């Protein structure tokens, strides 16, 4: 008999919606699973796709997660300066069975101090920066280190979600969910990662330089705070919630 499991995903402004909704859809395919989307309020939250998603629960009323999931997107780097979010993640992570992320959501886990000395992955365009937060970057679609499970960029969230289901429910259930959703990828091009033969090296180089310039300052601020005791960290207030 499949036991009820509560999945709790962080929803935040400027999230990459597929990081969130892809795994959430997979998780919802297991009978008895509950999927909650948590944010500070219940107001619609704008995504980077131009539409908004409505949270199901706020931080105050959020139930304890069995599986905590942090999606990515540029908005994830804004959260590195948000004490309320980082405190919420630490509280949830303390009692969760699995603490997980997709794409650049790994940086939020790192900013909360949860990746120190842990193997982890993220989107290729920011992968090397994980080391700044004490993580051990590993090139893979999905990486598990104890109770920490991280997924690579965006579409890797589907592989990630099936991996999580296999850990929680067993491989047989994961296979049944995969079949039910007809997850049988055959991409029309072989350009989905810098290592693939059709990937444009010039695009890779431009993207790596742009993402480091855009994101590294927030990561370095988070790194500096991690060197202080949690109680003495001061973030200087909560940033605006818009994208």
Image: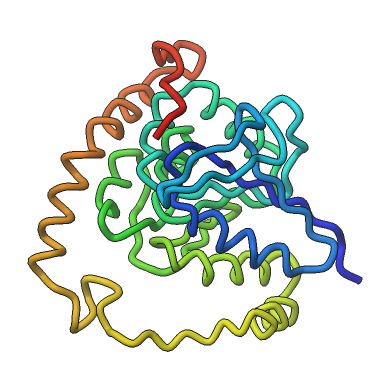
Q: Measured from the top left, where is residue 103 in percent x and y?
A: 42, 55
Q: Residue 113 location in percent, x, y?
A: 46, 34
**Residue depicted at 61% across the width and 71% down the height:** 162
Q: Which colour scheme is used?
A: rainbow
Q: In this view, does 21 lie above or below 8?
A: below
Q: 48 or 191: nearer the eye? A: 48
Which quadrant of the view contains residue 131? top left
**Vertical placement of residue 79 versus 30, above or below:** above
Image x and y of residue 156, in percent: 45, 67
Image position, residue 232 (x, y; %): 45, 11
Res 170 seen here: yes
Q: List the single residue furthest toward the front.
A: 51
Q: In this rendering, would 220 be left or right of 225?
A: left
Q: Residue at x 17, y 56 (%)?
A: 207
Q: How many marks?
A: 0
Q: In which quarter of the image is residue 82?
A: top left
The N terminus lies in which quarter of the figure? bottom right
Residue closest to the eye, 186 or 63: 186
Figure check: 6 above or below 159: above
Q: On the picture, is 133 further left or further right than 26?
A: left
Q: Quadrant where the C terminus lies?
A: top left
Residue under the image location 43 percent in, 31 percent down: 79
Asked if residue 201 lies left or right of residue 147, the reply is left
Q: Residue 105, can we see it?
A: no
Q: Residue furthest right?
A: 1
Res 62 quadrant in image: top right
């Amino acid at each position: 008999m499949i036991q009820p499991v509560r999945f709790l995903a962080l929803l935040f402004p400027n999230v990459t919606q597929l990081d969130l909704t892809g795994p959430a859809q997979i998780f919802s395919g297991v009978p008895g699973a509950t999927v909650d989307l948590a944010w500070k309020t219940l107001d619609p939250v704008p995504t980077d796709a131009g539409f908004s998603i409505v949270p199901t629960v706020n931080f105050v009323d959020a139930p304890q997660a069995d599986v905590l999931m942090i999606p990515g997107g540029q908005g994830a780097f804004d959260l590195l300066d948000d004490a309320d979010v980082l405190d919420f993640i630490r509280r949830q992570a303390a009692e969760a069975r699995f603490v997980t992320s997709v794409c650049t959501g790994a940086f939020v886990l790192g900013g909360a101090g949860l990746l120190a000395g842990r193997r982890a992955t993220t989107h290729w365009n920011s992968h090397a920066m994980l080391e700044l937060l004490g993580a051990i970057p590993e090139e893979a679609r999905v990486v598990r280190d104890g109770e920490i499970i991280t997924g690579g960029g965006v579409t890797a969230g589907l592989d990630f979600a099936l991996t999580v289901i296999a850990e929680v429910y067993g491989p047989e259930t994961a296979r049944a969910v995969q079949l039910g959703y007809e997850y049988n990828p055959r991409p029309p091009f072989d350009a989905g990662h810098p290592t693939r033969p059709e990937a444009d090296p010039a695009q890779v180089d431009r993207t790596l330089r742009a993402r480091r310039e855009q994101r590294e300052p927030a990561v370095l601020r988070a790194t500096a705070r991690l060197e202080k005791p949690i109680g003495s960290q001061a973030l200087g207030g909560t940033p605006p919630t818009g994208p």
